[in-house]
Image (cartoon, rainbow, N blue to C red):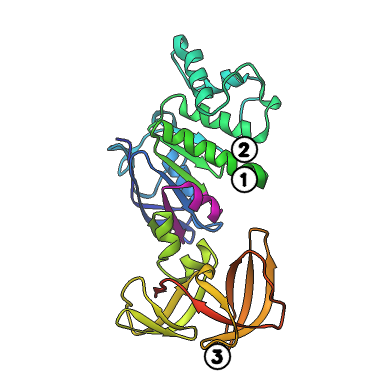
Amino acid sequence: MTDLRIEGLTKAYGPDATVLDGLDLTVPSGSLAAVLGPSGCGKTTLLRVVAGFLRADAGTVTVGGRVLTGPGTHVPPERRRVGIVPQEGALFPHLSVARNVAFGLTDRSTRRRRAEEMLDLVGLSGYGDRMPHELSGGQQQRIALARALAPEPALVLLDEPFNALDSALRAGVRADVRAALRAIGATALLVTHDQQEALSTADLVAVVRDGRIAQCGTPQDVYGRPADPWVAGFVGDAVLLPASAANGTAETPLGTIELSKPAASPAGTVILRPEQLRLTDPGEAGPAGTVTDVRYYGHDAMVTVAVDGLDAPVDIRVSGEVRLRLGDRTGIHVTGRGTPH
């Protein structure tokens, strides 16, 4: 088992610069967890502490039951059995692809065979004799993953490894990396600020805020049942409605909405996603408003509507062609359940 357990992890760079504030996180063996958060929230510091590049002020880090960081314990990076995939591959330019992949291997008799196995795993069989400058950006990232996996690490850390790739290439490389990690059952931690990347790639998503985990769960849980309005807005587009809750439903300016869980108090906020709203005929009974903006993305569009009786406009995600124009009147219908807060 190579589960990752982080408990009470604290790190400060000065008396007024606490970056990690008692952070707790558990990643089951064989899972890929994405650590998602805004700049300055502590993501990179977390990665560096787990890798052993930084000493924690307090807390523990264990992998497969082995303590790497703890009171009186700091295993150096080279003895942690942790593989790292940096942001831009960081391949050695003077070494061939095969020698890059085999760089961390000490058994000379198996280096070539292991390098070939890893290249096959990442879909680059036959590339061993090429030089890094002969590879595309996506290929270089896959070579960096192969190099990290070659020594059979207990844990793989991925430090925003897709940032340097263009958007057309990024999705394909993400899928290749995810498939390679799953093929060998690796436990991995992906640090990212890209919400779509976290939701589409990881088994678990841990949202970091001010040095702590604000919410951790499956992508479906974090997106569909956000812990609070901040998490909802950070993970994706959110519609926040004032509400009065009772008996599993809430009365809102958009009508009566079923709740996904019991409300903590009668008065509060209901969180919806824009795809839960539907445009209807303005003559129908129910809430209505005026279109104030339309943003077209190709696969869908976002229509902003100023709703009668609601201070803030709401965004509605629409599939297919949008016939509404600015100033048009429209009705609104809510589907699915809202999350109370």
- Residue 205 among magenta residues: yes
Give the numbered dot on residue 309.
3
Q: CA distance from mark 1 to mark 3?
A: 42 Å
Q: Is residue 162 visible?
A: no
Determine contact: label 2, label 1, CB under 8 Å.
yes
Q: Amino acid at mark 2?
A: Glu
Q: Does residue 172 sit above or below 100 in this rendering?
A: below
Bounds of the magenta segment: 192-210
Which is more N-terminal, label 3 or label 1? 1
Q: Are marks 1 and 3 in contact (CB under 8 Å)?
A: no
| Real-space Cα separation, disc 2 to disc 3, in angstroms | 50 Å
Residue count near mark 3 (Cα–Cα under 10 Å), binned few <14, some 14–19, many ≥20: few
Disc 1 marks which residue?
Answer: 163
Residue 297, quarter of picture = bottom right
Give the residue type at disc 1: Asn
| Residue under the image location 42 percent in, 65 percent down | 226
The amino acid type of the residue labelled 3 equals Gly
